[in-house]
Image (cartoon, rainbow, N blue to C red):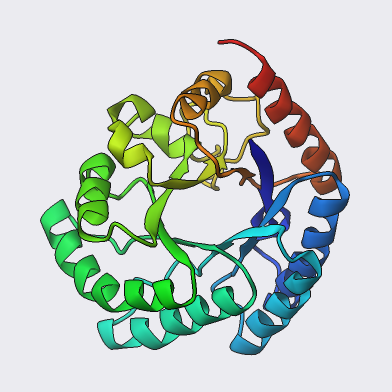
Amino acid sequence: MIISCSTATFLDPEDSPEGKFRTTISAMEHIIFSGYNGIELFIAQVFSDEMINLLLHEALKYQGKVLTLHAPKNILHKPFKEIFPSLSRLIKKAGQHYIPVIVLHPPFRSNIDSLLKTIFPIFDKMVDYAIKYNVTLTIENVPYLPNPPLFYENLISRYPKNVGITIDTEYLFSTEFSLEKYPIKVLRYLKNVHVRDYDGQGFDDEGKRKYLRLGEGKISFSEIFDKLREIDYPGPLTVETSFKNPLEDLKESKIFIYSALSSPY
């Protein structure tokens, strides 16, 4: 399998937009220099259009290595009329810069019917645009997504082309929807796997988002990877956690994944 890493792993949430921008540029170099097969380019909400353009230009140095682009987390949370220009620009830029997959967070809705009524009008327009630029739009299984397997089944039934799934391993374990609850026909649309560990607590004692080194939690990654082999998953395993010691954690994460891939569960 392809081992990738998100540039988000290097970002300090407290840093300035300019600091996050500079860190993102250096992160791409560190990821490839450390022997990873791919990069997920994370676009922070605070990045200006100019910053995004510069990052994508920088990404051309690693053409063929930038496998996924994580859209700003709020891009589908905006008022309806604001979504189309911002998402269409991102799709066009991804296509022009040879990035085949975009990761999106769904808007919050209390039930699946309400979510589908929101997503369908957006994707009815945007999927054709994604096809034009040879880009696949994926939606991640974030914790507030109601019944992800059923949601994805509805999504791929309506859009058999250029729509897919990003699954986060932490969210498989922190919600009731484990990988076993995903039908094979749904998993065939899996395009990206965010690899994160989980120990049962999403926040630390100070109320801050808790991120673990791979192997510090309770997730059986070898079991997950074996399931991915069963479905001939061709996409990346993308490390997506917050590194405390970036270069050291980058190296250790790759070693951990290779070990889990070779270890029977």
| Residue 75 placement, left or right of 196 | left
Residue in the image at 34% along x and 34% along y:
175
Q: Quadrant of residue 128?
A: bottom left
Q: Position of residue 66 (x, y in %)?
A: 68, 61
Residue at the spot 85% in from the left edge and 39% down from the top edge:
248
Image spot of residue 34 (x, y percent): 85, 46
Q: Position of residue 50 (x, y in %)?
A: 66, 89
Q: Residue at x 73, y 55 (%)?
A: 10
- Residue found at the very far top of the displayed protein: 264
Instruction: Decide if residue 241 is on the left or right side of residue 259.
Output: left
Residue 225 in view of the camera: yes
Q: Is residue 55 above or below residue 116?
A: below
Q: Quadrant of the C terminus?
A: top right
Does the rendering let one see residue 111? no
Residue farthest left in this picture: 113
Query: Is 17 rendered above or below residue 180?
Result: below
Q: Nearer the viewer, residue 117 or 74?
A: 117
Relative depth, front residue between 110 and 182: 182
Q: How many marks?
A: 0
Residue 54 drawn at (x, y percent): 72, 82
Whether residue 248 sits left or right of residue 11 in the image: it is right
> Quadrant of the image for the N terminus?
top right
The residue at 44%/30% (across/down) is 231
Identify whether 90 is placed above or below 5. below
Residue 85, by quadrant, is bottom left
